[in-house]
Every structure is written in C-alpha cells, then in structure tokens.
Image (cartoon, helix red, strand yellow):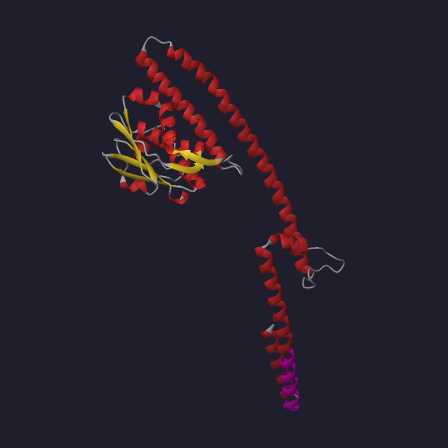
C-alpha cells in the first residue's frame, strides 16, 4: 500500500515536470494525501488493535466467542467483522462442529472398547479360577506351583490390559480414602505368592505403618507391577519391602538395570537391555506405573546397579 502511494507521488511529480506545471500544487496534494493517509492508518490501527484484543479475550474463554457470534443480515460481530472474516468464522464453526462429532464418535467407540475388555477380563477369570482348582488337586506339587505361578501371570497381564485402557479414559473410577500402605503391599504379595514359590524367592517385609490418602486399587496396581518386575528379573534370594513416613520401597537382589536405561525406564514401549534379553517384555508395565502415579499425585523412582539389584521407590510427599 505504501509502495503504491509512493509510485503515485512519483508519477505526479514526473507529469508536473514533463508538462512544466508548477510543482507546488503537486507537493501540496502529496502532503494533503499523506496527512489523510496518516489519519486513515491511525483509525485502521485502532480497529486492528480492538479486533486483536477482542480475539485474545475470546481465545482465553472460547465459550464467550461462541455465545457472541450471532450473524445478522449485514453479518458482523460487535460491528467489527467484515464479510471475509465472517466467512472465516463460519468455517471455524463448521470445522468445530465436525470435530465435536468426530470426538463424540471416537469417545463412543473407546467406551465400547473399554466395556468389551472389562467384560473380557472378568470372563477370563472364570477359566483361570477353574484351572487353579484343577492345579490344587494335582499330585505333582512342583508342577502345580509352576502352573499356578503362570496363571497368576496371565491374570496380571489381563488386569494390565484393562488398566491400560482405563488410564486413557476420561473417568478412571478414582476413590480417594485413607489407605494403610502395609495392607496394600501385603495383599499384592499374597496375590503373587505362587510366583515367589515357583522361583524359590523369599520375602522380607518390614512394616512401615504408613497411611496416606489415595486410591487403594491404583496404588495396588503400582506395587503389583514393581513386585512382578522384581520376580521376573531375580532367580534366587530375597525381595525386601520397607518404608518410612514419606515413601515405600520394593528392593530386589536381581540383575539390576543399566545406568543408561534408568532415564528412559518409564517411557512407553521402552524395554532396555534387560527387555531385549527378556523376550516377553512389552515395555508397558513401568509406563503404566508412571501414568497411574501421575494420576494419584505421587512420584515413582527407580534406583539400580547392574548385578546388585533394583530399588523401586514410591514417594508420597505430594500427599502431605
């Protein structure tokens, strides 16, 4: 725009020079045009700033913008929207409607999938329980213990699949209450006792008398994953359970974790050196632990040294 005005002024000066017309009228015309242009730019800038501030306000609270858009025959919002801008707004509204419908459809599909897997997990517990009863009546106790340990692992994987879906849903069925951490840990140890027996591992449990406000089910899931990993990567010895007024620790005497893997241990799908050796490792267990911990407002930390074991620590400072 400025370049076009400059070209016009140059043309006026050139024409005045060619036809030997006095330059003063041309100069006055140019000066008057500049003054008018300055006032026009000031008004246009004020309108621009007003429109910008209006959009910033509506970006902070989009609902206000949705309520304000009521098109008239002239088509404006607060008298500051021209025809092109009205077209853009209509386009945004249309895209928003399409996005909302897509989100509703995806949400319905997701909820349906969660319902299916919820039913599936409950259904698969029936044959697991039936097989467990058969195993209890087996005469070969060593084989029975190994089979029972594998059944416990299957049930744990089924629960992990369901929790994976629940963590991505809008509602995770949280119920916060005062929870005795020792009770939660004992329950998880009992669930996996067959896995301890199958590997010949012993338990060293030191009561912490720690009580916190949290969701018992999800805290149990976190503890259960830590115990499962400790059993998986330890062939003999003892798994230790202890805590204090701010934390609880599950420490094993297993193969440990390489230092370069510690920083990425909670990433989705990351298995690290141990995971490559353990062919059935999915890299989802600790990822889900981190997601559940964030949901509960607690922290989880892994400390380890190759060949000397691993400490999985739950920090409850955020609950204080």
Residue at the left extreme of this rendering:
307
Magenta residues span 21-36
- The answer to whether residue 273 is magenta is no
Q: Quadrant of residue 284?
A: top left
Q: Is residue 313 visible?
A: no
- The answer to whether residue 26 is magenta is yes
The quarter of the picture where the N terminus appears is: bottom right
- In front: 171, or 97? 171
Residue at the top extreme of this rendering:
139
**Which x, y percent locates residue 65?**
64, 55
* 38 w.r.t. 163: above or below: below
Q: Residue at x 28, y 35 (%)?
A: 310
- In front: 66, or 34? 66
Q: Overall secondary structure of the magenta stretch?
A: helix
* 53 w.r.t. 183: above or below: below
Q: Quadrant of residue 201?
A: top left
**Which x, y percent locates residue 147?**
36, 16
* 204 w.r.t. 148: above or below: below
Q: Residue at x 39, y 22 (%)?
A: 152
Q: Residue at x 59, y 54 (%)?
A: 61
Q: Residue at x 64, y 73 (%)?
A: 43
The quarter of the picture where the C terminus appears is: top left
Q: Quadrant of residue 314?
A: top left
- In front: 108, or 2? 108
**Which x, y percent locates residue 10?**
60, 81
Question: How many numbered discs sit on the rendered protein?
Answer: 0
For residue 304, side relative to residue 16 (left or right) = left
**Which x, y percent locates residue 148?**
37, 17
């Amino acid at each position: 725009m400025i370049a076009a005005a400059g070209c016009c002024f140059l043309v006026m000066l050139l024409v005045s020079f060619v036809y030997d017309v006095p330059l003063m009228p041309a100069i006055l015309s140019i000066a008057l045009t500049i003054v008018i242009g300055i006032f026009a730019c000031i008004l246009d800038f004020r309108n621009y700033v007003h429109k910008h501030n209006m959009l910033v306000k509506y970006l902070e609270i989009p609902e206000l913008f949705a309520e304000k858009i009521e098109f008239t025959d002239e088509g404006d919002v607060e008298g500051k929207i021209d025809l092109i801008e009205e077209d853009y707004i209509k386009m945004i509204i249309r895209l928003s409607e399409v996005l909302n419908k897509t989100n509703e459809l995806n949400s319905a599909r997701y909820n349906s999938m969660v319902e299916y897997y919820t039913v599936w997990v409950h259904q698969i517990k029936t044959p697991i329980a039936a097989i467990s009863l058969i195993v209890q009546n087996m005469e070969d106790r060593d084989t029975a213990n190994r089979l029972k340990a594998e059944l416990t692992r299957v049930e744990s994987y089924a629960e992990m699949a369901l929790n994976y879906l629940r963590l991505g849903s809008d509602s995770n069925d949280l119920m916060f209450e005062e929870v005795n951490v020792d009770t939660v840990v004992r329950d998880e140890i009992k669930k996996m006792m067959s896995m301890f027996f199958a590997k010949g591992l012993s338990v060293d449990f030191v009561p912490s008398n720690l009580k916190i406000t949290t969701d018992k089910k999800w805290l149990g899931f976190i503890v259960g994953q830590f115990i499962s990993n400790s059993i998986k990567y330890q062939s003999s010895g003892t798994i230790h359970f202890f805590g204090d007024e701010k934390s609880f620790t599950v420490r094993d005497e297993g193969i440990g974790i390489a230092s370069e893997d510690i920083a990425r241990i909670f990433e989705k799908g990351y298995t690290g050196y141990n995971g490559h050796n353990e062919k059935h490792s999915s890299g989802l267990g600790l990822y889900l632990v981190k997601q559940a911990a964030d949901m509960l407002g607690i922290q989880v930390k892994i400390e380890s040294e190759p060949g000397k074991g691993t400490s999985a620590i739950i920090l409850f400072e955020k609950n204080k």
